[in-house]
Structure formats: C-alpha cells, structure tokens
Image: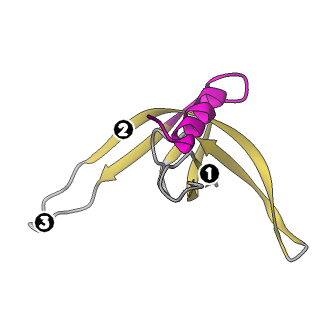
C-alpha cells in the first residue's frame, strides 16, 4: 500500500503532466578526460524526458532581495545533478543547484533545480 508521500509524489507528477507543466529534456553528460593508463575516456550523453514547471523565483534574505533566478520544479522520476542541461523548448539551461523536496525525509516528491 502506498504511503501518503508516495501518493503525493504521484499527484505532483500528474499535475506536471497536465496543464501546470511541460515536458523537457534533461541532458546528462559523463566521461571525458583520461583514465589511469592515459587513454582517452569518451564522453557519453544521455537524454531523459522529464516533466516539470519552469518559473522565475525571487530569493530573499532578511528582507533584502538577493535576486531573481529561474527555477525548474521537476517530477521525482529522474534526479537532476549540477551541470546537467535542461532543454526547455528552444532554450538551454545549465543546472546550478538541486534540492530534493522530501517532507518525510525519505520519499522525494519533486526536485527543485536552480538554473543558470
């Protein structure tokens, strides 16, 4: 039987799949450089389809506006990492920081990624 947090995570994904969200490409690159033997390690790229919402968010500290950043709230299916690329339509963003939202500390309901 699903927990309340698992049900909520499913509901968030459903909302992102509907009128509140869109479908984006999360591009993850790995490899590159050299291995211990000095041989070139090839760069591999993997594209993942993710659902989410992209919006601007104000960041405040002690009543002072620190700035406005673009934030993507993504479903809990694929965890984004810093330096991954999020392709939204024709716009490409690089992920700066990622925060997992898990109210019970165990079940992630969504990921919040600050974009640059």
- Where is mark 3, residue-wise? 38
State the image quarter where residue 86 is shown. top right
Residue, far bottom: 62
Frontmost residue, 79 versus 6? 6
Is residue 88 in sight in this rendering?
Answer: no
Q: Which mark is drawn over residue 46?
A: 2
Between disc 2 and disc 1, the foreground one is 1
Residues at circles 2 and 1 in contact by the CB criterion of under 8 Å:
no
- What residue lies at 28% left-to-right and 55% top-to-bottom? 32
Q: Which mark's residue is nearer the viewer, 3 or 1?
A: 1
Residue pushed farthest left?
37
Residue 104, can we see it?
Answer: yes
Identify the mark at residue 112; answer none if there is no mark: 1
Q: Do the numbered discs 3 and 2 sit on residues whose CB atoms are within 8 Å? A: no
Q: Nearer the viewer, residue 114 or 85?
A: 114
- Crowding at label 2, few (<14), some or many (≥20) Cα neighbours within 10 Å? few
- The answer to whether residue 33 is left or right of residue 14 is left
Q: Quadrant of residue 110?
A: top right
Q: Which region is colored magenta? A: 1-25
Quadrant the N terminus occupies: top left
CA gap, disc 3 and disc 1: 38 Å
Q: Is residue 46 above or below residue 114?
A: above
Distance from label 2 to label 1 (Cα)? 20 Å
């Amino acid at each position: 039987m699903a927990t309340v947090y698992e049900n909520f995570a499913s509901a968030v994904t459903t909302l992102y799949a509907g009128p509140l969200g869109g479908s984006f490409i999360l591009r993850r690159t790995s490899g590159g450089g050299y291995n211990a033997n000095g041989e070139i390690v090839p760069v591999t790229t993997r594209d993942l389809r993710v659902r989410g919402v992209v919006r601007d968010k104000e960041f405040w500290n002690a009543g002072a506006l620190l700035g406005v950043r673009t934030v993507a709230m993504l479903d809990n299916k694929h965890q984004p990492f810093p330096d991954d690329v999020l392709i939204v339509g024709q716009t490409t963003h690089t992920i700066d920081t990622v925060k997992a939202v898990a109210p019970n500390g165990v079940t992630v309901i969504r990921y919040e990624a600050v974009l640059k």
